[in-house]
Image (cartoon, rainbow, N blue to C red):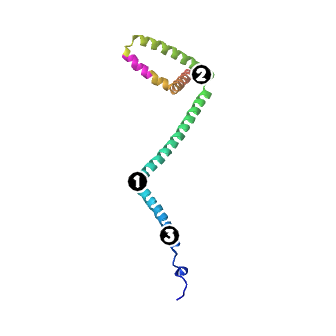
Amino acid sequence: MTNEPRTNIGTPTPEELREQVAQTRDELGQTVEALAGKADVKAQAKEKAAAVKEQAAEKTALVTDQIRAAAQQAVQVVKDKTPDPVLDKAAQASEKIVQATSRAGHLAAEKTPDPVLDRANRAATAARANSKPLLAVGAALVVLLLIRRARGRR
């Protein structure tokens, strides 16, 4: 045996022991947090739901953009292939339809009971809110009918 203090031959000093204990506590705390996170099924489900919702929103936006682009391209193709006289006739027919509809609306309003008018006003408000798609569909139908009519005469 030697007369050297035991700390020099491998026995840790009290300060080294305190460091080891502190480090072990930190590691144990991190391990407990990780296990608690894995055990919290509700939090995991919320995270997964949020991720799925975000993916669905991104895909919806992408598909919506693709549909709009395809619709715009289709409209442009129809306009490009439709002769100008047909487009002019479609515009004139559209104007006549607007005028006739307006006249019919005024006549109907004069002879329709108030409760029915209230419901009709609500429906008209909904149609005005979606007027662009309705007008686009109506114009496309008029153009297609005129093209079909013109081809039928040939």
Residue at point 47% right, 24% down? 127
- Disc 2: CA contacts within 10 A as few (<14), some (14-19) or many (>=20): some
Residue at point 43% right, 60% down? 35
Residue at point 49% right, 43% down? 56
Residue 22 placement (x, y as % from top left): 49, 66
Q: Earlier in the sequence, mark 2 or mark 3?
A: 3
Along the line of sight, the residue nearer the viewer: 67 or 10: 10
Classify residue 70 by image quadrant: top right
Q: Does 127 sit above or below residue 34?
A: above
Q: Which residue is mark 3?
A: 18
Q: Which residue is mark 1?
A: 41
- In what element is the residue under mark 2? helix
Residue 14 placement (x, y as % from top left): 50, 73
- Disc 3: CA contacts within 10 A as few (<14), some (14-19) or many (>=20): few
Q: CA distance from mark 3 to mark 1?
A: 36 Å
The secondary structure making up most of the magenta span is helix
Q: Which residues are magenta?
A: 115-123
Q: Is residue 122 magenta?
A: yes
Q: Earlier in the sequence, mark 3 or mark 1?
A: 3
Query: Amino acid under label 1?
Result: Val
Q: Nearer the viewer, mark 2 or mark 3?
A: 3
Q: Which residue is mark 2?
A: 87
Query: Amino acid under label 2?
Result: Leu
- In what element is the residue under mark 3? helix
Q: Is residue 40 magenta?
A: no
Query: Amino acid under label 3?
Result: Arg
Circle 3/circle 1 CB separation < 8 Å:
no
Q: CA distance from mark 2 to mark 3?
A: 89 Å
Q: CA distance from mark 2 to mark 1?
A: 62 Å
- In what element is the residue under mark 1? helix
Residue 106 placement (x, y as % from top left): 45, 12
- Disc 1: CA contacts within 10 A as few (<14), some (14-19) or many (>=20): few
